[in-house]
């Protein structure tokens, strides 16, 4: 049976009995415009009780965010509208409410926090005043009373030095601090319902852990019902009381956390849960092949240049040494600002390293410039994070794939033949050549990017967060593809990721970076199962859902 | 902040020197001889030589340049070839009308254009927005002198509300001064109102798509607050930039407008000096305009941090 002792998060009997604060009943949302009517959401029904944490899980396009915007009455008026159904907030149908009534309900009855704390706050207004706006709109408190209440709230979200935070602008705060400000704003009037739309997705794992704990704490204190939207089953396993699984605008399955994670009824849910990569690394024999890429004491310093010589320099990477063998996948893991992407960009020489060596088969490319560097470029290729922005939208896929070959003097017809071969290798048909990037899904685009990178037959492939923007099911496919390519052509891969689960699945060797330095390096099994450094241990402990075995539908 | 201003002002010196040299060279390279214009058609070669000598035009060009630059460093812009009056005092005499015209235009433009842009953004895609945008296309495409003559014809000649042409300084009373400025300012504002209204609209619409606008709405803010409090200030930087560029480009508008309305300002002085090949006057004016241009750019840059706390110098 499910070890409930280790998962003491069953909803208490009291919340079972109380009436739901939010009931969504047969909700449908359609696209505004000419017939035929296109529905974004259909038949959405679920409810939340006071003090309950309901996780809505789904991949991109599942309609989970649209559902939350519908509850807030914030659907973009020109493009989406609700067609049928009811959304009852404490029994009041918000779909029938006037705009003025909706404004009254927002922040007092239902509040929302968002994915991107970087952009969710007005950049030109002090954060204290942005919280104050909620109080000015909804209360008649005096200026001094409002200020006292805000400082109290900032203290409740565990901000240090609240007076200073009050007078700070968003850009002066870290991502985690900004999210705390957004949470203060949402919860200061103690709403009954909190909608959290991927609130930790843009944060580092250690920050994510703190924010999740904070939401939990405030929820307990005020008995708030939380509608938590996420794509991350790790987070779900950590916090959910109940789970709603959505796909393509419909509810697939609703159930308690343990029901969904351990006994999913629907095939879609099964597929989704089992796609979550395991934190347990695969056992691999150590490679003895030749070293293809050898970094020696690589450093990159950004100098803040002032007119009168004043300025500070930032060491983005300091003394980074690592090597990648033929057929090996070496992962660099770390949080934002750890310098992992700087290393990747130096290796492909999109950035110039300040010092150190980058040896590719023994040739140092760290200091090569101009005509020396150009032939080196074909030996190192890169795949970027966002497949939506890394392909030129106005070029045919075929032209994007052959661009490098043409640059290096290959005849067009030969290059096109090679491109067809490569698209086959990454699992796309040859007719993809004639189409444009927008005609492909994210996963397909990332396959195209991989084909493009392979076109020049490089010795080294650098993948910079190459699967981070993809849904888990697609992520699993792209990871499998990379693994196959490594097997077939024996390429050396430098794999940059913030996600330890992904690293566990694909990497032979893992290098952990923090503040521009290598903290720990070793085989994936060593680093993930027997970490030697505190920082590595902290990273692993912060990985959400690490006591759940998703592949086998059981707790660990 | 202060060191930044000092640095920026210091940086204007090499720019001004380059402007001075280029202007000097270009003027000498264009055809036309000031001596011939002063002497008239019947002058003999000896008379011409004599005039050139008194003006210093017979010396080698590099020497003329060095002498001019040397005097420039002492704040002496030289004297007009035509009248012998110091260039500095000529500029001083003609400054008034141009300054009044330019300032009036800026104030009127900002007062009309920004509200129009806000309204258009608020009613985006609706009738009011399309009406404002159509008008702004019109404002762009009709040249200033056409608008000027239309205004003169309708409001001055037909209705007699305003004097047809001319200028009275402020010292002769506010009403005569203002009455003669209304039409030139209106004529000149047209283009800038169109430009700045469009930029205001598009900047606000862009900001309205940002995440923090959704945050403001989720707090229960009204649309008016969302627009005026959250969107407008975030849209300010591009608007201020365009206003700055607009002011800088006012100089050419001033030349045309002063000719149409017969205002004795710097614009007219430019035209007169060019026609007479009065080198020192042209040089002095272009240096002045360049300096104003640089100063406005600096002012715009100094205004950015007022609107956006992320910008610091």
Image (cartoon, coloured by chain):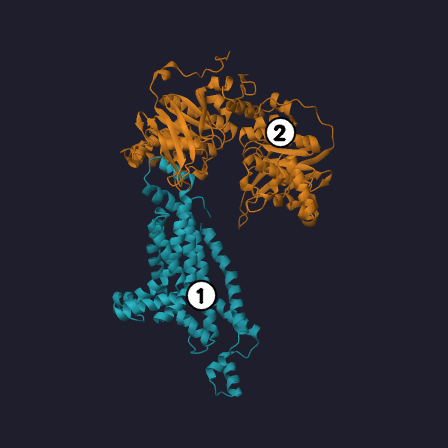
Chain colours: A orange, B cyan
Classify residue A53 by image quadrant: top left
* Residues packed near mark 1 inside 10 Å, few (<14), some (14 to 19) or many (20 plus): few
* Image position of B303 with respect to A330: above or below: below
| Residue that badge 2 annotates | A480
Which residue is nearer to you in this view: A384 or B173? A384
Q: Are marks 2 and 1 on the same chain?
A: no
Using the image, name the chain to which the residue with label 1 belongs: B
Q: Is residue A314 left or right of residue B204?
A: right
Q: Which residue is mark 1?
A: B288
SS for callout 2: helix
Q: Secondary structure at mark 1?
A: helix
A319 relative to A92 in the view: left or right: right
* Disc 2: host chain: A
Dot 2 alpha-carbon crowd within 10 angstroms: few under 14, some 14 to 19, many 20 or more: some
Give the side of residue A72 with respect to residue B281, left or right: left
- Name the residue rendered at 34%, 28% in the picture: A86
Q: Could you say where residue B226 lies in the image, as x and y percent from the top left?
A: 35, 41
């Amino acid at each position: 049976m499910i070890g409930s002792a280790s998962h003491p998060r069953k909803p208490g009997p009291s919340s079972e009995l109380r009436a739901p604060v939010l009931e969504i009943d047969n909700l449908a949302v359609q696209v505004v415009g000419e017939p035929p009517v296109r529905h974004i959401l259909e038949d959405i029904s679920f409810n939340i009780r006071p003090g309950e944490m309901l996780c809505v899980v789904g991949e991109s396009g599942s309609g989970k965010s649209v559902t939350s915007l519908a509850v807030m009455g914030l659907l973009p008026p020109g493009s989406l509208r609700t067609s049928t159904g009811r959304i009852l907030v404490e029994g009041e149908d918000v779909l029938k409410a006037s705009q003025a009534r909706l404004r009254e309900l927002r922040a007092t009855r239902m509040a929302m926090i968002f994915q991107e704390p970087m952009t969710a706050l007005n950049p030109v207004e002090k954060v204290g005043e942005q919280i104050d706006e909620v109080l000015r709109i909804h209360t008649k408190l005096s200026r001094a009373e409002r200020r006292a209440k805000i400082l109290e709230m900032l203290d409740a979200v565990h901000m240090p030095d609240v007076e200073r935070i009050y007078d700070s602008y968003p850009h002066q705060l870290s991502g985690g601090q900004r999210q705390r400000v957004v949470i203060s704003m949402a919860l200061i009037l103690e709403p009954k319902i909190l909608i959290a739309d991927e609130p930790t997705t843009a944060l580092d794992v250690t920050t994510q852990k703190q924010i999740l704990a904070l939401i939990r704490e405030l929820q307990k204190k005020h008995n708030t019902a939380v509608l938590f939207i996420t794509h991350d089953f790790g987070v779900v396993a950590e916090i959910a009381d109940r789970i709603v699984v959505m796909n393509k605008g419909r509810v697939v399955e609703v159930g308690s956390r343990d029901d969904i994670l351990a006994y999913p009824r629907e095939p879609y849910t099964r597929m989704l849960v089992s796609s979550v990569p395991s934190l347990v690394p695969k056992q691999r024999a150590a490679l003895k092949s030749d070293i293809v890429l050898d970094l020696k004491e690589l450093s990159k310093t950004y100098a803040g240049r002032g007119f009168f010589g004043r300025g500070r320099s930032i060491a983005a990477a300091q003394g980074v040494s690592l090597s990648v063998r033929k057929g090996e996948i070496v992962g660099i893991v770390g949080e934002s600002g750890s310098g992992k992407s700087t290393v990747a960009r130096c290796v492909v020489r999109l950035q110039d390293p300040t010092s150190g060596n980058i040896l590719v088969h023994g040739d140092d490319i760290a200091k090569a410039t101009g005509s020396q560097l150009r032939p080196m470029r074909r030996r190192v290729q890169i795949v970027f994070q966002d497949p939506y922005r890394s392909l030129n939208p106005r070029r045919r896929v075929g032209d994007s794939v052959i661009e490098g070959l043409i640059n290096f003097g290959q005849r067009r017809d030969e290059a096109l033949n090679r491109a067809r071969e490569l698209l086959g290798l990454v699992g796309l048909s040859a007719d993809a050549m004639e189409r444009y990037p927008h005609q492909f899904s994210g996963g397909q685009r990332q396959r195209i990017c991989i084909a493009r990178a392979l076109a020049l037959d490089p010795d080294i492939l650098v993948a910079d967060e190459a699967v981070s923007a993809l849904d888990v099911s697609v992520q699993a496919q792209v990871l499998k593809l990379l693994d196959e390519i490594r097997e077939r052509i024996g390429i050396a891969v430098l794999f940059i990721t913030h996600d330890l689960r992904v690293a566990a699945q694909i990497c032979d060797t893992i290098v952990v970076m923090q503040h521009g330095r290598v903290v720990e390096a070793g085989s994936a099994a060593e680093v993930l199962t027997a970490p030697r450094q505190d920082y590595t241990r902290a990273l692993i402990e912060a990985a959400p859902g690490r006591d759940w075995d998703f592949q086998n539908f059981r707790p660990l | 902040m202060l060191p930044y201003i000092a640095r920026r002002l210091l940086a204007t010196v090499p720019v001004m020197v380059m402007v001075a040299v280029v202007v000097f060279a270009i003027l000498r390279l264009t055809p036309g001889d000031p001596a011939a214009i002063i002497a008239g058609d019947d002058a003999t070669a000896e008379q011409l030589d004599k005039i050139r000598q008194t003006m210093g035009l017979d010396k080698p060009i590099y020497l003329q340049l060095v002498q001019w630059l040397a005097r420039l460093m002492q704040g002496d812009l030289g004297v007009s070839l035509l009248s012998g009056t110091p260039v500095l005092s000529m500029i001083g005499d003609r400054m008034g009308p141009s300054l009044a015209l330019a300032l009036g235009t800026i104030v009127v433009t900002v007062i009309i254009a920004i509200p129009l842009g806000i309204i258009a953004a608020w009613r985006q895609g609706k009738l009011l927005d399309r009406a404002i945008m159509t008008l702004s296309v019109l404002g762009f495409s009709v040249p200033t002198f056409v608008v000027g003559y239309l205004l003169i014809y309708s409001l001055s000649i037909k209705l007699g509300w305003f004097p047809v042409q001319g200028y009275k300084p402020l010292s002769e009373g506010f009403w005569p001064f203002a009455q003669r400025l209304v039409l030139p300012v209106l004529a000149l504002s047209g283009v800038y109102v169109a430009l700045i209204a469009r930029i205001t609209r598009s900047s606000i619409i862009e900001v309205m798509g940002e995440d923090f606008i959704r945050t403001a709405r989720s707090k229960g803010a009204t649309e008016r607050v969302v627009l005026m409090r959250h969107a407008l200030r975030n849209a300010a930087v591009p608007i201020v930039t365009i206003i700055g560029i607009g002011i800088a480009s006012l100089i050419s508008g001033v030349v045309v407008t002063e000719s149409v309305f017969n205002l004795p300002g710097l614009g007219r002085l430019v035209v007169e000096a060019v026609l007479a090949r009065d080198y020192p006057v042209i040089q002095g004016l272009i240096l002045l305009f360049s300096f104003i241009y640089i100063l406005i750019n600096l002012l715009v840059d100094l205004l950015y941090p007022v609107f956006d706390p992320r910008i610091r110098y």
